[in-house]
Structures are given as structure tokens and as C-alpha cells.
Image (cartoon, rainbow, N blue to C red):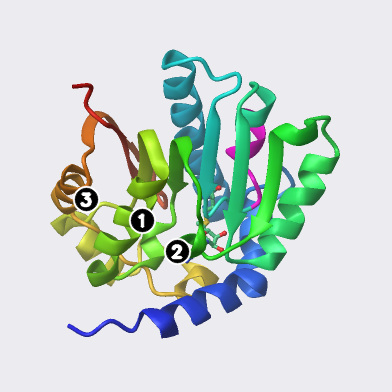
């Protein structure tokens, strides 16, 4: 299939600067939300908590350089910087980054946390750990190989991804509209088979050493932690 990536990206960017921004800022906040949004908020928080827990168990977090690709409003970047990591968060949406900066300004994190408007494919540099949570849902199958390959090239030792796994049950639920209800339907949601993501990670020199599935009524996410095997 031919890629309509450029088009998808423009739509996603526009969505997260407008209606998507309003919706997700609320979901990723702590104010009143409806039942569906609360379910998604709690599921997403479990994903964030799992990643923070894993990182705390790994090599020293203080001073570790972390790239949070597609960081949204900083739900993960902020707690990691609070734990002493040096975090570079970036996101394609100006509005999400604006909100992330506002949230960070209230804390005293100094140089440990920086946010930048940037398309994931334009991220450069080298980081101990690269993390990309709940962004692959915006990438069609034919684009994930390049996207994950790029993230892998930035990561010296660890790469953590979370994404909506493609399985017959979820494909069916998505079809009947049980998942991704309401305005989130304005962007297309792409699910990806776990084995494809594992294969791509492996092709880029990473082995999955931890995995966790977070599932609730309206939120579901497969988290994979991959490392470069020691020689
Ligand atoms: N990772 C954050 C988290 O878990 O809290 C945000 C997840 S949110 C569902 C998806 C985010 O991906 C949005 O903030 C969106 O703007 C961002 N995004 C989508 N495509 C992107 C791209 N090509 N480059 C950078 N960010 C992107």
C-alpha cells in the first residue's frame, strides 16, 4: 500500500492543536471528566506508572538522558525529571508543548526538563533512553518500520514503546465503536501486531526484555521495554 503519511501527519498535527488538544489536555489533567475520559485517564496513568517503575529499577535515573518522543503535555517527562533524569520532551503539537511548558513552569526542575515542538522524525541526538508512549496509534502499518528505526538510532541503551496492539478482539471492538469513542474518532487509529513491533525492534539491534499489557474498557496499551544486548 502507498503511504499517505504526509496527509496523516498534517491531520494529526491539526487535531492535537485544536479539538484533540482540548480533549487530551483534560484527560491528562486532574479536573472533572466524563466516565469514558476517566477510564482513559486511569489507563494512561497506569502506563506512565509502569514505565516510571521499570526505569526506577534499571540503571540510575539521576543524570540519565531521556528523550520523550511525542510527549504530549509531559505526563511522563515531568515525573522522570522530578526523579533526576535529564529529559527532552518533544511533540508535533504546539498546543500540547505549550501546556507541557506551563505545567513544568510550576515545578522547580531547572535545566533537567526541556520541551520543544518537533516532529518525531526530526529528533536528533543520542540519549540513554528513548520513550514513545501512545504515539504509534497515529502511524499506519507501513510507516512504523521507519519511525521505530529512527527512535532506535537515537537510543544508546533502552527503547520503551507503548501502542494499541492489533488482535482480532480489538479489531472487532474498534469496528463496532466500543473503543475510541467520541471526538477521538476524528483521527484514524492504527493498531499494530505486537510481533511486528518486536521484529522491527530486533532488526534495529534491540531485544524486548519486559512487557506489560494495560487494558481497561476504553484504553488499551501494550508496553515494551527493549534493550541493546550486551556483547
Ligand atoms: N506520549 C504522551 C503521553 O503518553 O502522555 C502523549 C500521547 S497522545 C495520545 C499522542 C501525542 O503524539 C500527541 O501529543 C500528538 O501531538 C503526538 N504526535 C503524533 N504524531 C506525532 C509526530 N509525528 N511527531 C511528534 N509527536 C506526534
Residue beneath disc 2: 121
Residue beneath disc 3: 197
The answer to whether any part of residue 42 appears in the image is yes
| Quarter occupied by residue 77 | top right
Q: Position of residue 141 (x, y in %)?
A: 24, 67
Ligand 1 neighbours mark 1 (CB distance < 8 Å): no
- The reply to whether discs 2 and 3 touch (Cβ–Cβ < 8 Å) is no
Q: Position of residue 15 (x, y in %)?
A: 58, 75
Residue beneath disc 1: 150
Badge nearest the viewer, 1 or 3: 1
Closer to the chain start, of discs 2 and 3, is 2
In the displayed structure, would residue 175 be above or below residue 106?
below
Count how many numbered circles sit on residues in the image.
Answer: 3
| Quarter occupied by residue 170 | bottom left
Ligand 1 neighbours mark 2 (CB distance < 8 Å): yes
Q: CA distance from mark 1 to mark 2?
A: 7 Å
Tell me which segment is drawn in magenta.
Answer: 73-79
Amino acid at each position: 500500500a502507498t503511504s499517505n503519511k504526509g496527509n496523516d501527519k498534517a491531520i494529526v498535527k491539526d487535531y492535537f492543536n485544536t479539538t484533540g488538544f482540548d480533549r487530551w489536555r483534560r484527560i491528562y489533567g486532574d479536573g472533572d471528566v466524563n466516565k469514558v475520559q476517566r477510564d482513559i485517564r486511569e489507563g494512561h496513568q497506569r502506563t506512565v506508572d509502569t514505565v516510571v517503575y521499570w526505569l526506577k529499577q534499571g540503571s540510575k535515573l539521576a543524570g540519565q538522558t531521556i528523550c520523550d518522543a511525542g510527549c504530549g503535555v509531559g505526563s511522563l517527562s515531568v515525573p522522570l525529571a522530578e526523579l533526576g533524569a535529564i529529559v527532552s520532551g518533544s511533540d508535533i503539537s504546539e498546543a500540547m508543548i505549550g501546556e507541557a511548558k506551563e505545567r513544568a513552569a510550576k515545578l522547580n526542575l531547572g535545566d533537567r526538563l526541556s520541551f520543544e515542538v518537533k516532529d518525531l522524525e526530526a529528533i536528533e541526538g543520542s540519549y540513554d533512553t528513548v520513550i514513545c508512549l501512545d504515539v504509534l496509534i497515529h502511524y499506519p502499518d507501513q510507516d512504523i518500520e521507519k519511525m521505530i528505526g529512527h527512535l532506535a538510532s537515537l537510543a544508546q541503551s533502552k527503547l520503551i514503546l507503548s501502542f494499541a496492539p492489533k488482535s482480532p478482539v480489538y479489531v472487532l471492538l474498534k469496528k463496532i465503536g466500543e473503543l475510541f469513542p467520541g471526538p477521538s474518532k476524528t483521527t484514524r487509529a492504527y493498531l499494530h501486531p505486537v510481533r511486528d513491533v518486536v521484529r522491527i525492534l530486533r532488526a534495529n539491534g534491540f531485544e524486548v526484555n519486559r512487557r506489560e499489557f494495560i487494558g481497561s474498557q476504553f484504553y488499551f496499551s501494550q508496553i515494551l521495554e527493549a534493550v541493546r544486548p550486551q556483547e
